[in-house]
Image (cartoon, grey):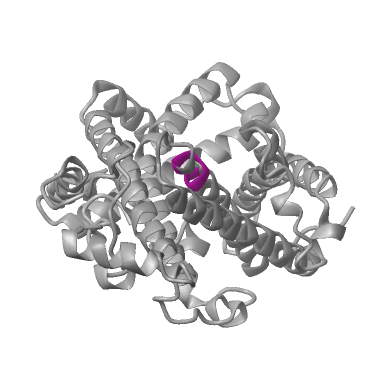
Amino acid sequence: MRRHGESGAETAAVADAARSLRAASRRISGTLHTFRPLLDPPWADGLRTELAWLSTTLAQEHACTSRLSRLLDALSRLSGTAPLPPARGESLPLYGSTAHNGSLGGESGPHPPAEAPAAAHLPTGPADSGDADGHAVRDGAPGALAAGTADTAPAALADSAGTDHGTPAAGERPASRGVRATVTTAAADRAGRTAGSPSGNGALAVGAARAAALLERQLTLARTRAHSGALQALGSSRFHAVADAVALLASELPLGPAAAGPAAETLALRAEAAERRLLAAVAELPLRRAAHPYNAEALFSGLAAAPAGEAQDAPWHDVRRLLRLHRYAQEVLHPGTDPVLCHAGILLDRHRDAAEAAAAAATAARTPRIAPATAYALGVLHADQRHEVEAARFAFQQEWRHATTAVTAP
C-alpha cells in the first residue's frame, strides 16, 4: 500500500504495487483460512471476507485485459497470420525457472499477456456491432474510446489467478490497443468478392476480423468498468479499514484456545488438514482420462446449456484453490518455494484462463444478429480454447506424478 501511494504518476510502478497488494491480500486470506481454528473465528472470518473482496476487485481489470489478449492472439493464430507458437515443452520449463519467479514466489495466476497482434495480423473486415448491418468499428467509436480511456486513466489494477484468478494491470498498455477492425468501403468490396470465390476464404477472414472487433468491444467495456470499480475501492473507507486491520496483525493477532500448544505441532496439524483436503479433491479428478492426449473430454457438452458445459471445470478450479492453500501452509512450516507445487499451480492457472476465455468466446457468439461468418469464427475460437483446457489437464496430471516428493499420494 505504501509503494502504491508513493508511485505517483509512474504507471508501471502503480501496476506493480497494485499487483503486490492483490497477491498479499490473497496470501493472507488463504493463511487465515487454513489456520482459522487457531484464531478467533469471527475475527478471522470477517477479515477474510474483506481481503477476498479486495483481491477480487483488483483482479477484474487484469482478467479482462489478459483474456482479450489471449483471444486476439488465438484468432490471429487460427487465421494463419501469426507465426507458429513454440512447442509446449519449450514455452514452460518442467519444474519452473527464474523466468517464473514472480508467480512461484508470490501468487500464481495468468501470465502477463504478450503484445496484442497488430492490426495487420488480423484480416480487415466489417465489425459486428450487434445489428444486421454489421457497422464498422472506427477509431473514435465507443469501443475505441473506452480502450483509450482505460489506457490513460490512473491505474491501480493489478495482478495472476488466480483468481486469484493472477497478471498486466492498470498502467500497462491494454492488449486491445493495436487491434482495430477499421473498414473502408473498398476493403468490404474486396472481402465480398473474395467471399464469392470458390474457396470462400474471404468470408472466413472477414468473420475473424468481426469476431476480433466484437470481443474487443465487449472486453474493453468490461475492463473500463473494472478499472473504475477498482479506483473507487482503493479510495474507499472500506479499503482503508482493511489496511488498518492487516497492519495490526503482527502485534494484535487474536489467538484462540487451540493455539496454546507447541507451535510446531499445532501448525503442522492444520497444514496436514489442508493437504488431506487437496488429496481428496485430486482423487476426484479424472486424471486417468486426462493422461490420454486428445481425449476431447473438454469439449463434452460444448453445445449444452452454459452451466452444464462448464460443470466439468469446477472440480479443477477447486483443486487449484486447494493447491494454493496447501502451498501457503507448507511455506509457513518450511519457508521457501516448492518448484513442483508451484508449477502444478501454474498449469491449473492456465486451465482456468483457457476455460474463462472459452466462456468469453461463447458469450460473444450469443450476441444477437451477428453475421454467420462471425459466429463461425467465434465457434472455432471457443473450440480452440477448450482444447487448451484439455492440454492443461494433460500437463497437470503429468506434473502431479512428480508431486509425491512434496505431497504424499493417497
Query: Which residue ends up furthest to the right in the rendered image?
Result: 410
Q: Is residue 140 above or below residue 51?
A: below
Lateral position of residue 356 relative to residue 322, left or right: left
Residue at 42 percent across and 38 percent down: it is: 55
Q: Is residue 105 above or below residue 56?
A: below
Q: Residue 224 in the image: state x and y as whole percent.
A: 25, 39
Q: Look at the image and say whether residue 363 sits in the magenta stretch.
A: yes
Q: Is residue 339 above or below residue 58?
A: below
Residue at 52 percent across and 82 percent down: it is: 86
Q: Residue 377 in the image: state x and y as whole percent.
A: 48, 56
Lateral position of residue 356 relative to residue 6, left or right: right
Q: Look at the image and say whether residue 321 sits in the magenta stretch.
A: no
What is the span of residues highlighted in magenta in the rendered image?
360-364
Q: Residue 118 in the image: state x and y as whole percent.
A: 27, 70
Residue at 62 percent across and 44 percent down: it is: 321
Task: Give 35 or 88, whichever is nearer the viewer.
Answer: 88
Quarter of the image holding residue 230?
top left
Query: Which residue ends up furthest to the top in the rendered image?
Result: 42
Task: Give 367 or 36, whichever is nearer the viewer.
Answer: 367
Q: Is residue 196 above or below residue 15?
A: below
Residue at 49 percent across and 72 percent down: it is: 199
Residue 310 shows in this picture: yes
Secondary structure of the magenta portion, mostly? helix
Task: Give 260 or 209, whichever is nearer the viewer.
Answer: 209
Q: How many marks?
A: 0
Task: Give 290 or 164, whichever is nearer the viewer.
Answer: 290
Quarter of the image holding residue 149?
top left
